[in-house]
Image: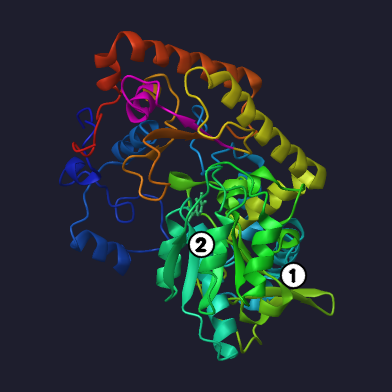
């Protein structure tokens, strides 16, 4: 097959007769005498015929065209793109787990339930909650599960509370999940320090409010230092406090959402607990709650009865299943392996280093990209592009040419951030970058900053190193 071009799909590589019939063509005696029906069906629906080597080259080329944490720095704020230790992949590939089938008898899956009981316990311990369900498939899915739990709780009390409050700095999934769970969403403004505006929140806490969704530290990288007052105000109104756990990487082993007053949390294991993320694979968004809400958690959950870990199917108040079978077992196994190898002290150290690294970058970049909020940050920092001749967007695109993934862009065009930010970047280095890597990033930022001052056209035309610079010409 000829050399492939960037826009080529597997279908473009089709060549009649290229796919060999492994079953009938083999001279080795096959236990399967003729192509089974499913293979014949596939050929009949017109799937492309491509030789094995061309299939391998096609997908290898595609994998090389994307940027991952395994081939360069990935300071994408809010996403915690940290390195995933490969030993956890080996753990997930152990045949006892990898070859288990979700339909085999529940009592032959003892190892999975044992791992689930332990992981549920670790998540409860880290978040300060009492019960946990591992089934949701991602953070947003965990939000939906948590909000349905909240709805079930109030429905059972015949307490009509159709409203969920969300701060204006919230991740876009928060209002989306609230809407999907059937709530009306109201937006709480931030104050001048980037915190929740407590006066506005108090006014908005009316008897129809079921919950306030919050992440701490916030998506601006700032710790909500009024969290105790916030929790008291929410609870005094009979409402619940929901913790978006996407920023847990800032405070593992240091402070727990449950101790801050949160009632429900979700955890993005593919962020904080170092499992594949984004294009790297499916994630998981376990949801954990205080005891009063435990009966409503989705199913299945794992319990230990008479010393034996097993699935608990006797949960009449549960909101039901959020995911087929048992959730993403292989992802959760990686999270379990990560937590076991880190231990409590290691988790705390990871968070401390994540915060240290973010403050190091904030300080060293401040003469080019001053922090929007002039104070120490947590695990990520929001830097202003106001001194750039081009824009934060173009600056970020030029970083691609130097092998650094663009940070998260904030401001114009980003609907879910406070509206008055014009051009800013949210940078999250994570704890897995070395000091040498951070220094390299500073050097590259300086180079691009200088280019922005002397050769605006160059920065405007970035990225120059990609076969496709813009997928959507409007951007
Ligand atoms: C990533 C993120 C989410 C959504 O999580 P997914 O796992 O991507 O669905 C929610 N809130 C915040 C603050 C996030 O950063």
Q: Residues within 10 Å of mark 1 (few under 14, many from 20)?
A: many
Q: Which mark is residue 186?
A: none
Q: Residue at x 62, y 89 (%)?
A: 316
- Highlighted magenta segment, given as a residue range: 380-398
Q: Quadrant of the N terminus?
A: top left
Q: Nearer the viewer, residue 202 or 287?
A: 202
Q: Residue at x 59, y 61 (%)?
A: 329
The residue positioned farthest toward the right in the image shown: 307
Q: Mark 1 highlights which residue? A: 130
Mark 2 CB within 8 Å of ligand 1:
no
Report if residue 391 lies within the magenta region: yes
- Picture coordinates of residue 136, whole percent (x, y): 54, 65
The residue positioned farthest toward the top in the image shown: 454
Q: Which mark is residue 137?
A: 2
- Picture coordinates of residue 408, whole percent (x, y): 44, 37
Q: Nearer the viewer, mark 2 or mark 1?
A: 1
Asked which secondary structure carries label 1, the reply is: loop
């Amino acid at each position: 097959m000829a050399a492939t071009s960037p826009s080529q799909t597997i279908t473009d590589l089709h060549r009649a007769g290229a796919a060999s019939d492994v079953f009938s063509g083999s001279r080795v005696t096959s236990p399967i005498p003729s192509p089974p029906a499913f293979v014949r069906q596939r050929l009949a629906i017109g799937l492309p015929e491509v030789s094995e080597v061309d299939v391998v080259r096609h997908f290898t080329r595609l994998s090389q065209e994307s940027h991952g944490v395994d081939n360069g720095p990935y300071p994408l704020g809010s996403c915690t793109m940290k390195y995933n230790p490969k030993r956890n992949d080996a753990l997930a590939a152990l045949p006892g787990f990898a070859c288990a089938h979700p339909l085999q008898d529940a009592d032959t899956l003892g190892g999975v339930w044992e791992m689930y009981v332990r992981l549920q316990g670790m998540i409860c311990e880290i978040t300060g909650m009492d019960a946990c369900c591992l089934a949701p498939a991602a953070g947003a899915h965990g939000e939906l599960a948590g909000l349905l739990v909240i709805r079930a709780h109030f429905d059972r009390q015949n307490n009509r509370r159709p409203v969920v409050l969300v701060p204006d700095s919230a991740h876009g999934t928060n209002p989306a999940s609230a809407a999907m769970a059937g709530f009306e969403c109201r937006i709480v403004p931030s104050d001048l320090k980037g915190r929740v505006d407590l006066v506005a929140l108090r006014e908005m806490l009316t008897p129809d409010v079921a919950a306030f969704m919050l992440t701490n530290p916030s998506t601006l990288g700032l710790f909500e230092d009024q969290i105790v007052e916030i929790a008291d105000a929410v609870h005094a109104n009979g409402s619940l406090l929901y913790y978006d756990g996407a920023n847990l990487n800032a405070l593992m082993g240091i402070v727990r959402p449950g101790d801050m007053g949160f009632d429900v949390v979700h955890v993005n294991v593919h962020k904080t607990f170092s499992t594949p993320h984004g294009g790297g694979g499916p994630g998981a968004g376990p949801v954990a709650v205080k005891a009063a809400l435990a009966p409503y958690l989705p199913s299945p959950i794992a319990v230990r009865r008479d010393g034996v870990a097993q699935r608990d199917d006797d949960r009449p108040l549960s909101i039901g299943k959020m995911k087929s079978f048992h959730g993403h077992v292989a992802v959760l196994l990686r999270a379990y392996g990560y937590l076991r190898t880190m231990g409590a002290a290691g988790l705390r150290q990871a968070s401390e280093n994540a915060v240290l690294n973010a403050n190091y970058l904030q300080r060293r970049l401040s003469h080019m990209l001053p922090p929007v909020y002039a104070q120490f940050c947590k695990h990520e920092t929001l830097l202003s592009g106001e001194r750039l001749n081009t824009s934060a967007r173009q600056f970020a695109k030029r970083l691609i040419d130097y092998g650094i993934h663009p940070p998260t862009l904030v401001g114009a065009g980003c609907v879910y951030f406070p509206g008055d930010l014009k051009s800013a970047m949210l940078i999250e280095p994570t704890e897995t970058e070395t000091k040498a890597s951070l220094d390299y990033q500073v050097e590259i930022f300086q180079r691009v900053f200088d280019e922005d001052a002397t050769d605006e056209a160059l920065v405007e035309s970035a990225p120059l190193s990609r076969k496709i610079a813009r997928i959507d010409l409007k951007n």
